[in-house]
Amino acid sequence: MFANEQFIPQYQFPYLVAQNIPNIEIDKQYNPCSCVSYAKWKLGVSQNVYWGNAGEIKPTTKEPIVGGLILTREGDGHLGVIISYTSQSVTFDDSNYLSCEETRRELPIDSLLIRGYSR
């Protein structure tokens, strides 16, 4: 044994050396109190890209698109990321519908709350 070496005990197999479990919460780099910040994070858009407030975002289509935005008339404007839709409803993920929390919601496709969709 060299002078700077330390004794390393011998272990019986199997033994755990290290376990890397990514903490999803650490990877969430967005403001949970902003539906816009959440949508940018969910879609992989940099938080530095300016979108404005949800009420300022203009619809670009009248049809829902999976991975696109649903724009609503809730509050001063709200948005979510569409995860699925049918001829009857649109399902989307959003944040801050409930104060500073993520939610998954569904609205009827003909809901008056929906002001449009954006790609």
Image (cartoon, helix red, strand yellow):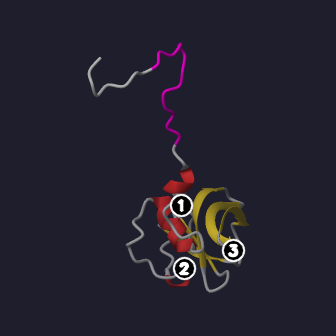
Query: Where residue 12 sits in the image (x, y, percent)?
Result: 53, 13
| On-image quarter of the N terminus | top left
User: Helix or strand or loop: what does disc 3 sit on?
Assistant: loop
**Amino acid of disc 3:** Ser
- Residue that badge 2 annotates: 54
Find the distance from the CA under tag 1 to the CA under tag 3: 26 Å
Q: Who's the residue at 53% across and 25% down the image?
A: 16
**Amino acid of disc 1:** Ile
Badge 2 or badge 3: first in the primary sequence: 2
Residue lying at the far left of the rendered structure: 2
How many labels, in total?
3
Kindly report which numbered mark, 2 or 3, lies closer to the viewer in this rendering.
3
Q: Who's the residue at 57% across and 74% down the image?
A: 34
Q: Is residue 26 above or below residue 62?
A: above
**First to last magenta residue range:** 9-21
The main secondary structure of the magenta stretch is loop
Taking the image as shown, residue 4 lies to the left or right of residue 97, namely left
Query: Where residue 67 sits in the image (x, y, percent)?
Result: 51, 58
Kindly report which numbered mark, 2 or 1, lies closer to the viewer in this rendering.
2
- Residue that badge 3 annotates: 99
Find the distance from the CA under tag 2 to the CA under tag 1: 18 Å
Q: Nearer the viewer, residue 18 or 27?
A: 18
User: Helix or strand or loop: what does disc 1 sit on?
Assistant: loop
* Magenta-colored stretch includes residue 117: no
